Image (tube, rainbow, N blue to C red):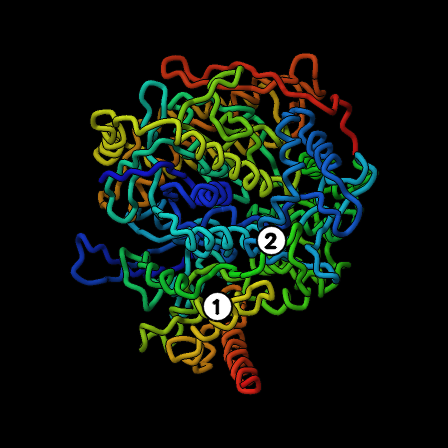
Amino acid sequence: MKCTFIVYRFDPAVDKEPRYQEYMVEAEPTDKILDCLNKIRWEQDPTLSYRYSCAHGICGSDALMINGRIELACQKLVRDFKTANNFVIEPLPLFKVIKDLVVDMNPFFEKHRTVRPYLISDEDPPEKEWLQDPENQKFFEPALACIMCGSCTAACPINRSNDKYLGPAALLRGFRYVADSRDTATGSRLAQLDNEDGAWGCKSMWWCTDVCPKSIPLTKSIAQIKRLIKEEEKRKTAGS
Amino acid sequence: MKHQFDVIIVGAGLAGLRAAIELGEDTSVAVLSKVFATRSHSGAAQGGIGAALGNEEEDNWEWHMFDTVKGSDYLGDQDAIEILARDAPRTIYELEHLGVPFNRTPEGKIAQRAFGGHTRNFGEAPVKRACFAADRTGRVILDTLWEKCLQGGIRFFDEFQLMSLIVSEGQCHGVIVYELASGKLHTLHSKAVLLATGGYGKVYKTTSNAFASTGDGLAIAFRAGAPLEDMEFVQFHPTGIYKLGILISEAARGEGGVLRNNEGKRFMELYAPVIKDLAPRDMVSRCILEEVRAGRGIDGKDYVHLDLTHLGEEVLNTKLAEITGFARTYSGVEPITEPIPVQPTCHYMMGGIAADADGKVITDSEGTPFPGLYAAGECACVSVHGANRLGCNSLLDTLVFGRRAGKEMRRYIHTVGFSPLPANPEKEAAAKIATLMESNGNETGGPIREELQEVMMDKVSVFRNRSGLTEALEKVRELKGRYQKIAIQDKGNCFNRDLLDAIELDYMLDLAEVITLGALAREESRGAHSREDFPDRDDQKWLVHTMFRYSKEEGPQVFFKPVTITRFQPKERKY
């Protein structure tokens, strides 16, 4: 079937302002949106730029705005859009556009770094594995599905007004290490997230959870951080 | 721009990152990757990583070694396989200590599950040997290692395309890379270079591999004088989603899933009576195609069903969550109630840059090293997988040999200084880009790539024969000719995918030629290489590694290297 693709274009070497370009694509209902972009590039316009790699929703390269909603281009098929055969393809919002659909993800990864995204333990590891309650592993397991595509952070209304806010993806990583029983830096991790640029910046608007292509309960995970902060406070008060 | 590091690592998958961690503490090291590091294809690995921990049932490394040797159809080098199997438990504990969030047993140990070809007591019955984190094992290990590198301050060059190795007087001392964002070339001067660039499944039409899996490191090393080993051995994973090739992990069968033909029959019982659906991948892929040939494909088509409906919602939504999602999204099937349509998909390359167990690239059948050049992971051939890799041995391979390569490079860099760079090292890469960008040729890359992928799929996949392979070779060479007339339409310098596609296509054409030549040369059937005109394994003549050396004038030149056999003499391979 014939589909119209209206695609955001911007080449800083040539364009003063972004523009939209229209393409007609012959697509199957089962084609991914990424397949359609590839058809445009291979058959009509090789100058179109966008990121992609695994093409099945696991590498996190191709989060885009598709018909006004943030999606992975490789995880949405033509048939998933019931309304019309018209597609408007735009780069991920919030991030600075480098060219066409390619955005600068560096600020996103910078925030990721700030949550100390690695296991910190002041215990010497045992000869074999650390034992871990399977319930503990299950508690933070949903966070492990994150592919760092940036969809949640791009969707978050708080991020748009406070550029210092860590954002849902970095907070999710924070939660993953706070919750891991093997990590002994829980106290300092919680202290780091106990402010308006951290967990309390989240106003539970659920936009991150809504757009997450891996269905991660982001808002809930951030709420868990808040709960753990409160529990830590109680413990401290009780102890003093 | 010029940069200097003791070691340059090309590729940010598990092999590259593991080597970087090994070196990072006291060595200046840079990791470069053509995609952002966490986009590396190691992250797509699903089912598990093998190690005889014995957490669920009795196991030991000798059984693991035997299974790997037998799985390799006796082509794997047994000294290297012994290293792999013996070092596996230490590797898992090390990952766990780094923070990898493995699934747990009720008592809190690392959980394990069954996987194809992994058995108890030298083939008696399947054994639970695969350590896993749901069906995103690669993802969590990749994330953990990358984050460990961030902690260690490893320097990353993300979105840089490898263009060439700097080689003078037979020694490697750096790389030339192309920066995607600016279109500029950079010279990275080093004492050692590790190639960890992964596989090249994109040579085939149906593949589980990423777009980035184009074999750049292999083709560049090959042209620089490093031989390629056992390239004819290409693994087709039995359960790719029909038409798409997206992988449905072997863990699905490890958890109890079964394959069924159009009669609803569990056909693997006939072909592998002992371990059935958990037979190795080469066998299961052939069995699926045999069923299809016998008219027992679903709806008369070239696929069968993977039935997981009896596993229950809990197992599917927790232990197999990713693949359950893939089936829903891409084939519109609900795996809780319906079988998934599957067919073999190009998944893994057993062949690669000939390397020893310390990652040193070797240049001949005696093992003479290529000074300064190292390889690890899928792009290397050590060879631990021989003619067929077992599931959950590839993650293990990347980590065991990535670490060993790191250790060896650390030793090596203290024995040498920085060699002076040759005059104008970027010349060749600059000329290559200029030729492509300024060409007025009448060809574009798209059709050449499509025709390449199609002919490799039709003639050089699971079943092969001389006439088909000869046709494929002619076609690949015709395509190589047409490639010379390729023109780039995007003249820009920023994220010029048109140019990058053309550069990758050049590499894929070279590799396709060597795969086909190897398949033509090897007149026997062994592991994943199945010749209809030579259906038997021939240990008298072919218990050897196939090696190809680049020659600009005469094309790839074949020679052979003996197989190392230590503990297990070749036997008939039955499951």
* Residue at the (33%, 24%) spot, across then down: B167
Q: Chain of mark 2?
A: B
Location of residue B410 in the rendering, given as x and y in whole percent from the top left corner: 44, 35
Residues B531 and B118: in front is: B118
Q: Nearer the viewer, mark 2 or mark 1?
A: 2
Task: Inspect the image, locate mark 2, and give the three-letter code of the amino acid beneath it.
Answer: Glu
Task: Inspect the image, locate mark 1, and give the three-letter code of the amino acid beneath it.
Answer: Gly
Displayed quadrant of residue B122: top right
Residues tagged 2 and 1 counted as in contact (Cβ below 8 A): no
Q: Is residue B277 above or below residue B171?
A: below
Location of residue B263 in the rendering, given as x and y in whole percent from the top left corner: 79, 47
Location of residue B99 in the rendering, given as x and y in whole percent from the top left corner: 56, 57
Residues B18 and A186: in front is: A186
Q: For the residues marked 2 and 1, what is the alpha-carbon distance in whole angstroms?
A: 19 Å
Residues A239 and A190: in front is: A239
Residue hosting label 1: A174
* Residue at the (65%, 23%) spot, across then down: B531
* Residue at the (24%, 38%) spot, across then down: B2
Q: Does any portion of residue B475 appear in the rendered image?
A: yes
Q: Does any portion of residue B463 appear in the rendered image?
A: no
Q: Is residue A165 above or below residue B298?
A: below
Dot 1 falls on a residue whose secondary structure is helix
Q: Residue B96 shows which numbered tag?
A: 2
Location of residue B387 in the rendering, given as x and y in whole percent from the top left corner: 63, 28
Quarter of the image where the N terminus of chain B is located: top left
